[in-house]
Image: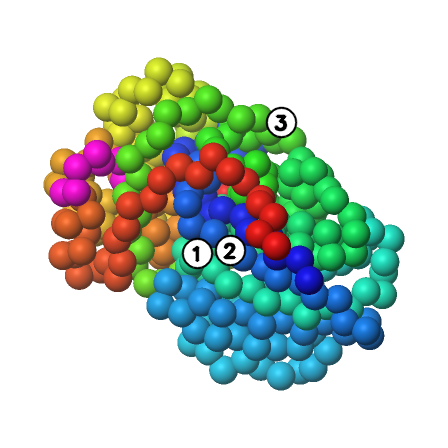
Amino acid sequence: MATSSAPGKVYLFGEHAVVYGEPAIPCAIERRATVTAERRSDDRLRVDAMDLTLDGFTVEYSSDTDETPDIDVPDSLLSAATGYVDGAISQARDAAGASDAGFEVTIESEIPLGAGLGSSAAVVVAAIDAASRELGTDLDSREIAARAYEVEYDVQNGQASRADTFCSATGGAVRVEGSDCSAIDAPNLPFVIGYDGGAGDTGDLVSGVRELRERYGFAADTIDAIGDLVREGERALVASDLEALGELMDFDHGLLSALGVSARSLDAMVWAARDAGAFGAKLTGAGGGGCIVALDESEETTGALRHTVDCAEAFRAELDTEGVRKEA
Ligand code: MEV
């Protein structure tokens, strides 16, 4: 039996534009997905997934049946979740040269599903590490990141960047531009997360942005502008300039809203954070629902979010400098 964990992440800047080769800066946060893989004597796969939202629910499915789990999340999210696990196990089998290895896989996650905190990447990264170690093969974090990207790319029909998977595999703040991925020497950032209790469909949201970009030159310009903003944001991050980072986060949220990926609940949480004195706030991840991230050293933003009708949970999240980690 082998157990591994990997962190979720927030996007400080650059989601969506990163799909078109612009740079992005995701930051790993101390909320982890933990995956245990245990070899079976046959070639079958059974997956138990627990606590895939902060509230917690149980999904139990076996990849060799048509059984539909009875849980309160959209089918698209559920089939994506099972697709990610199947893909991760295929990558581990491939890495170890054991194409018929069967597994019992158990997933526990502190990261809400589809909410912009990189839950799928964390599960895939941890699952590849646990299953390949269970097969006697140790992969380094870069290879795990590359294999996890292949899984996301397949499940998201070719609409994925390397940002989530690289950040989850290596931890810390990272810069991703196309296939160039590198660590950024960043200070600890006072992240506050607001979660509306819901989720967006990454595939639909990415497709929506693609259509806008093809239809309107100014939508393509908006994506280019996000790239410029990220380059400016990287300078502010390295200089530990929280005021500038906050201003750029506000700007990025405006550009993402223009691209149609915000939601009333996300806007309400962003404004609650700003009114509470946060340096800045923006949606994180694909959008459509899920989480916002704000920067605030005080407890004001967390308190204000907890009093916001659209906010189901608010919590502080430290930057996690550790990526994928062996737990057992
Ligand atoms: C989703 O977490 C972030 C997007 O930029 C898609 C991706 O980078 O794969 C919307």
Q: Are marks 2 and 1 in contact (CB under 8 Å)?
A: yes
Q: Nearer the viewer, residue 39 or 231?
A: 39
State yes or no: residue 164 in magenta. Answer: no
Residue 33's mark? 2
* Type of the residue with mark 3: Asp
Which residue carries the number 3 mark?
180
Which residue is farthest front?
328
**Which of disc 3 and disc 1 is earlier in sequence?**
1
Question: Tag 3, which secondary structure?
Answer: strand
Q: For this view, does 63 lie left or right of residue 169? A: right
* Residue count near mark 1 (Cα–Cα under 10 Å), binned few <14, some 14–19, many ≥20: many
Question: Closest to the observer: 184 or 68?
Answer: 184
- The residue that mark 1 highlights is 111
Percent position (x, y) of residue 59?
52, 75
Residue 264, picture quadrant: bottom left
In the figure, is residue 177 to the left or right of 270?
right
Residue at 34% x, 51% y: name it. 291
Q: Amino acid at mark 2?
A: Ala
Q: Using a 10 Å C-alpha cutoff, classify the residue at mark 2 as few (fewer than 14 neighbours), some (14 to 19) or many (20 or more).
A: many
* Image coords of residue 77 (percent x, y): 51, 65
202 in relation to 317, above or below:
below
CA distance separating discs 2 and 1? 7 Å
The crowding category of the residue bearing disc 3, from other C-alpha atoms within 10 Å (few below 14, some 14 to 19, many at least 20), is few
Viewport quadrant of the N terminus: bottom right
Label 1: which secondary element: loop
